[in-house]
């Protein structure tokens, strides 16, 4: 019953999230900028939302036909924030007596550092591996740093959205999870 209700809420929140993607992306992008600039002082000059795409203006320079210019990397923040509608659907599917707007808001806000991590890793992978030797040489990463960037990207892209949403939902809705687990245990005891 619970997961059926969550499945019904899912398309509603995916539409809501898709049309407000830029709004959801800005806080995570700002956190990612802070993280990257902490690791690589002054690497990101500015951020610009272009529709649902995030354009990251870096301090790295590259030669173009019209002269020297700053390297700009375009990222898709939706890759890292698709778990927002999943979390909303899971939270809104619970019984009314367990629902809390504040708890749901806190749960969604807890996803922001995870989204920021994914964006930061995506940016660093683009600069280190995808844009050529002229760009990657300006980062001056050692071999183990290249490996760490690649690992962070894979973790942030493949695992963190799923693990993050699941863990935050479990922690924020502990009473509901306990109830669901208890009803399963009772059912298993009766049928066993």
Image (spheres, rainbow, N blue to C red):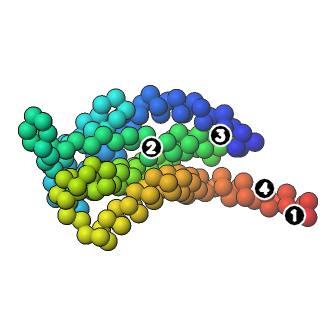
Q: Nearer the viewer, mark 2 or mark 4?
A: 2
Helix, strand, or loop for circle 3? helix
Q: CA distance from mark 4 to mark 3?
A: 18 Å
Numbered mark located on residue 6 in the image: 3
Earlier in the chain: of badge 2 and badge 4, it is: 2
Helix, strand, or loop for circle 2? helix
Q: CA distance from mark 2 to mark 3?
A: 21 Å
Left or right of 42, for residue 187: right
Residue 116, above or below 101 = below
Image coords of residue 106 (percent x, y) = 45, 48
Q: CA distance from mark 1 to mark 2?
A: 41 Å
Earlier in the chain: of badge 1 and badge 2, it is: 2
Image coords of residue 14 (percent x, y) = 53, 33
Earlier in the chain: of badge 4 and badge 3, it is: 3
Residue 77, above or below 164 = above
Which residue in the protein does label 4 denote? 183
Q: Nearer the viewer, mark 1 or mark 2?
A: 2
**Residue at (14%, 46%) from the top-left corner?**
62
Which residue in the protein does label 1 denote? 189
Residue 188, above or below 105 = below
Q: Nearer the viewer, residue 50 or 112?
A: 50
**Residue at (38%, 61%) from the top-left corner?**
150
Earlier in the chain: of badge 3 and badge 1, it is: 3
Left or right of 27, for residue 60: left
**Residue at (19%, 59%) from the top-left corner?**
137
The quarter of the picture where the C terminus appears is bottom right
Left or right of 13, for residue 144: left
Which residue in the protein does label 2 denote? 79
Q: Nearer the viewer, mark 3 or mark 1?
A: 3
Mark 1 surroundings within 10 Å by alpha-carbon count, few (fewer than 14), some (14 through 19), many (20 or more): few
Mark 3 surroundings within 10 Å by alpha-carbon count, few (fewer than 14), some (14 through 19), many (20 or more): some
**Residues at discs 2 and 3 in contact (Cβ within 8 Å):** no
């Amino acid at each position: 019953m619970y997961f059926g209700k969550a499945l019904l809420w899912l398309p509603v929140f995916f539409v809501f999230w898709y049309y407000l993607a830029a709004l959801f992306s800005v806080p995570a992008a700002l956190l990612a900028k802070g993280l990257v600039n902490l690791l690589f002082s002054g690497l990101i000059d500015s951020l610009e939302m272009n529709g649902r795409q995030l354009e990251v203006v870096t301090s790295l320079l590259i030669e173009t036909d019209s002269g020297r210019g700053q390297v700009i990397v375009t990222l898709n923040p939706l890759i890292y924030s698709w778990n927002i509608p999943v979390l909303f659907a899971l939270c809104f599917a619970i019984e009314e007596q367990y629902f809390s707007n504040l708890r749901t808001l806190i749960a969604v806000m807890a996803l922001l550092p995870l989204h920021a991590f994914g964006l930061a890793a995506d940016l660093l992978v683009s600069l280190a591996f995808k844009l050529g030797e002229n760009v990657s040489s300006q980062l001056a990463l050692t071999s183990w740093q290249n490996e760490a960037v690649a690992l962070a990207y894979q973790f942030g892209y493949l695992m963190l959205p799923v693990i993050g949403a699941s863990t935050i939902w479990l922690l924020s809705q502990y009473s509901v999870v306990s109830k669901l687990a208890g009803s399963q245990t009772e059912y298993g005891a009766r049928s066993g």
